[in-house]
Image (cartoon, grey):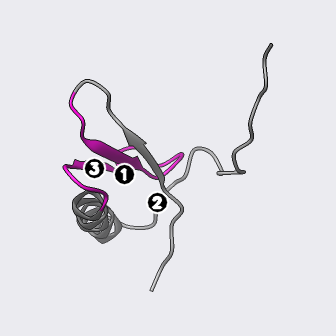
Amino acid sequence: MRSFTFIIERDEQTGLFVGHVPGWTGAHAQGATVEEMRANLEEVVAMLLEDGEPRLETTFVGTDQLKVA
């Protein structure tokens, strides 16, 4: 079993949850709930893996916060 880090955001216009694997073109999905988005993303990643190993364009490092006065 493989593990991939993914980012979850909420689209303010549609209200949908959007998930993507950083650096992996095409590895993204959306859903009305986080659970639906995750299931959709798992399906997309499984299909992409059928085509071979991913060539990640970047490596996820982390997140941080900025405080601006």
Q: Which mark is residue 54?
A: 2
**What residue is rendered at 55% in x and 52% in y?**
56
Q: Which mark is residue 29?
A: 3
What segment carries the magenta color?
14-34
> Which is nearer the eye, 57 or 61?
61
Residue holding disc 1: 27
Callout 1 secondary element: loop
> Which is nearer the eye, 62 or 47?
62
Q: Is residue 16 magenta?
A: yes
x, y percentage for residue 54?
A: 46, 60
16 left or right of 23?
left
- Which amino acid, mark 3? Ala
65 left or right of 15?
right
Distance from the alpha carbon under mark 3 to that under mark 2: 16 Å
Mark closest to the chain's N terminus, 3 or 2: 3
**Label 1: how many residues lie within 10 Å, few (<14), some (14-19) or many (20+)?**
many
Q: Are marks 3 and 2 in contact (CB under 8 Å)?
A: no
- Which amino acid, mark 1? Ala
Q: Quadrant of the C terminus?
A: top right
> Which is nearer the eye, 34 or 60?
34
11 left or right of 36?
right
Q: Which is closer to the viewer, label 1 or label 2?
A: 1
Q: Is residue 52 above or below residue 33?
A: below
